[in-house]
Image (spheres, rainbow, N blue to C red):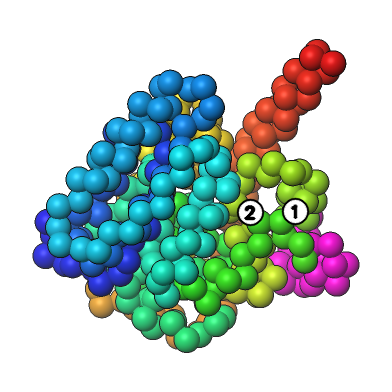
Amino acid sequence: MSEYRTGLPVVMIAFNRPEKAQQVLNVVRSVAPPMVLLVTDGPRPGNRADEEKCCMVRRILDGIDWPCEILRNHSERNLGCDRRVATGVSWAFEAVERAVVLEDDIIPHPSFFRYCEELLSRYADDERVMMISGTNVLGQWKQERQSYHFSYYGGIHGWASWRRAWKHFDPSISRWKDPEVRRRLRDVLVDRRQAAYRASLYDRIQGEADRGTWDYQWGFARLVQSGLSIVPSVNLVRNIGFDADATHTQGVWIPACDRPVGTAEFPLRHPGYMMVDREFDDRMFRAILPGWKCRVKKRLKGLLGVLGMKRKAA
């Protein structure tokens, strides 16, 4: 274990990838959190491989061997990555006021935990700040002058937040039906390209019963509140999920999500102001857009396949 011990609860979300779950657990073990909240999904119907792998994942997570409180939320049926993450995080924030959230393909640098802990304390009562991200999709940004900056985006590959912020999460983004909200979104983002792209995403999400995602809705919740995300000046996490077992990125490599991992340096150097770095947001938008397009195309392809099967059956 490292010398640093985090005081934060850690939410670990897993499904059917035992090797990856073990890697994440190894990093969490190194900082020995006082509470771990385990969220797992159940096997897909009729999938024997899932049944075996889901059992293996739960056995691995039962291997927590440092003194801590463990809460479990295991689903016996398959909810899918959208509902399982959303319901799991909601369950976690019913139990705790603040937490780090890690899915089973996210490997954070150990300094990520101290970075989150200090910032969760610093901004605990500042409702302008809604999320602390460990991801910097550009790799680094103005690290010579500060340890982090404020953004209207922020990645969910390793993040932390508070109950007070997550309460705004709505998987159906019902407020998107309000024309005033649509107009205000353009005011918040300023950039017409970003606003138009976000609008197209939210239109699609509202039009689907099976949305297949939760992170766009979390982003919407923050934007509707003009909520800020904290982004580190150097990338602090690695996503190891771009492989055949991936849900949204199977067969897809997204360079912006595969940046080298740096180290948070302490003491943190805080910005002297709370203003969105729009230059970063613009560059992040341009860097991540190919990945968003791949996810949308993959989702549409899956839906068209389902519709095709239904037509043949009819």
Q: Which mark is residue 101?
A: none
| Residues drawn in magenta | 176-197
- Which residue sits at x=73%, y=30%? 303
Residue 70 vs 64, above or below: the answer is below
- Which residue sits at x=63%, y=42%? 212
Left or right position of 187 against 234: right
Q: Position of residue 252 (x, y in %)?
A: 53, 30
The residue at which mark 2 appears reads as: 216
Q: Nearer the viewer, residue 18 or 190?
A: 18
Left or right position of 300 against 72: right
Q: How many dots with numbers?
A: 2
Report helix, strand or loop for mark 1: helix
Q: Position of residue 169 (x, y in %)?
A: 61, 65
Q: Nearer the viewer, residue 75 or 207?
A: 75
Q: Position of residue 172 (x, y in %)?
A: 71, 56
Q: Is residue 246 magenta?
A: no
Instruction: Of the two numbered discs 2 and 1 on the same chain, state the one appearing first in sequence.
Output: 1
Q: Residues within 10 Å of mark 1 (few under 14, many from 20)?
A: many
| Residue 93 in sight | yes
Q: Nearer the viewer, residue 158 or 309?
A: 309
For the view shown, which residue lies furthest in the front direction?
76
Q: Quadrant of residue 187?
A: bottom right
The residue at which mark 1 appears reads as: 202
Q: Nearer the viewer, residue 137 or 296?
A: 296
Tag 2 near tag 1, CB within 8 Å:
yes
Q: Which kind of residue does numbered mark 1 sit on?
A: Tyr
Most common SS among magenta residues: helix
Q: Which kind of residue does numbered mark 2 sit on?
A: Tyr
